[in-house]
Amino acid sequence: MGGGAHRTIQIKNRAKSKPAGKTTSHVSAAVNLDKLRLACLSWPSFLVIAGDLREDQRSMALRLPKQDYHDIERVIELDFVRATEAAALNSLRWLGRGDKEAADAAASDAIRGMFDLMNICGEVVIGEGIKDNAPGIFKGEQLGTWYPGSPEFHIALDPIDGTTNISKGAPNSISCIAAASPEEGVKVALRDIPSFYMSKLAYGPRVIEYMKKRGDSLHLDMPIAEILAIIAHAVNKRVQDVAVMMLDRPRHKEIVEQIRAAGASLRMIGDGDIAAAIAPSLPEPDVDLYMGIGGSPEAVLAAAAIKCLGGDMQCRMWPRDEKERKSLVADGHEQDLDRVYAADDLANGQNIIFCATGISDSALLPGVRARGGVTAITHSILMRAKSKTVRFVRARHDLQIKTIRLRSDNREHIL
């Protein structure tokens, strides 16, 4: 800007409501951008400012020149792991307590608190709360400090995949995040699917390599016996040794009968199909195939991980009833109802990272190991689509010193 003019933004300051009224008044002030930068030196005050940014400030933050980071996912990826670790540790006290909403709220609070310390402009494009009708982190929510010039990320997350499991003290619950930074030629990195459920088929790199060599192909509509035969050849097993994982649901009755008739080994899970869908793509998998009908947000999170691992999945929208089908058609999705989405359709581009931390044991990760209230061991996975690097992170936390920042009161808490 010429003539020595200062670029300014408008900051809304909170003001307490008057005793006699129910409205909240706001005081507007023009704040020089240089002063905003200086405010970052005082974290508590800066976080209040950052938390109060409205849509015009959001637009300003995104228009300002970005800080020159090379390969930003590589720089910031461990902070995403810290967020899922915090969610796992903060929700652990609800394991087996019968209150899945409290566990979800605890995990969400910890994730928001960690993001409050991260200099990013993060926007949630896929959240879990709306689908589950539970406390959660919602689509459109802003995460990070939103300090002007900070790198931009689109975020998909599930603070706890398997809330019912954690409430029962059962296996198969994780906390996971997928994130994507802007990339040339990629309009939508993490696709928000409008249907509640999707029909899914997920398999690992060995299956892809086999199909390329033999010219075979898998498809959602193939007879299950044929799918299992291809999987068996690809992983060099007999059909009866192929391990198939799926959710234990009445809607899967016919699929279960066909898998058993073919003689394959079936592993049913109560909840948590993100970890289950990822499992066949792991370097040394115990599961060869995931199939069945599960949540659409979970499909996108799984696709981000599967893409990083070199596997693939096929998904198609699965309306629960005629009412949902008509709603999807009315909203302009009629042509997409029969579309089969691959992992790259759901998680597009190379600037994608995925991380997860186990809460209770799953096919993907061991759960948190608490040691007499003195230490805790967490197990996490961190991976990038660009490099295909997969890191397994085993962390030891001293519970007498370890603190977790919670958004609910903007304070650090000892576990």
Image (tube, rainbow, N blue to C red):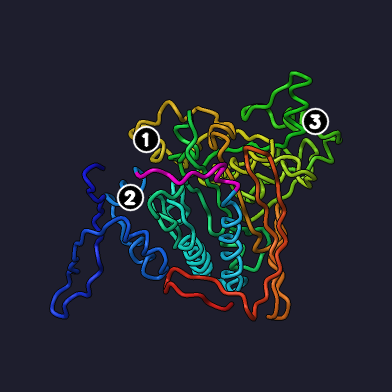
Task: Indicate the amino acid at tag 2.
Answer: Arg
Q: In this view, does 304 lie to the left or right of 242?
A: left
Q: Name the residue under label 1.
A: 326
Label 1 secondary element: helix
Horizontal side, residue 173 vs residue 3: left or right:
right
Disc 3/disc 2 C-alpha distance (Å): 49 Å
Mark 3 vs 2: CB contact within 8 A: no
Residue 234 tag number = 3
- What residue is drawn where x is 60% and y is 65%? 88
Q: Name the residue under label 2.
A: 58
Q: Is residue 246 above or below residue 88?
A: above
Region rendered in magenta: 64-74
* Crowd class of label 3 (few under 14; some 14 to 19; many from 20; radius 10 Å): some
Q: Is residue 301 magenta?
A: no
Camera-side residue: 175 or 294?
Answer: 175
In the rendered image, the quadrant that contains the C terminus is: bottom right
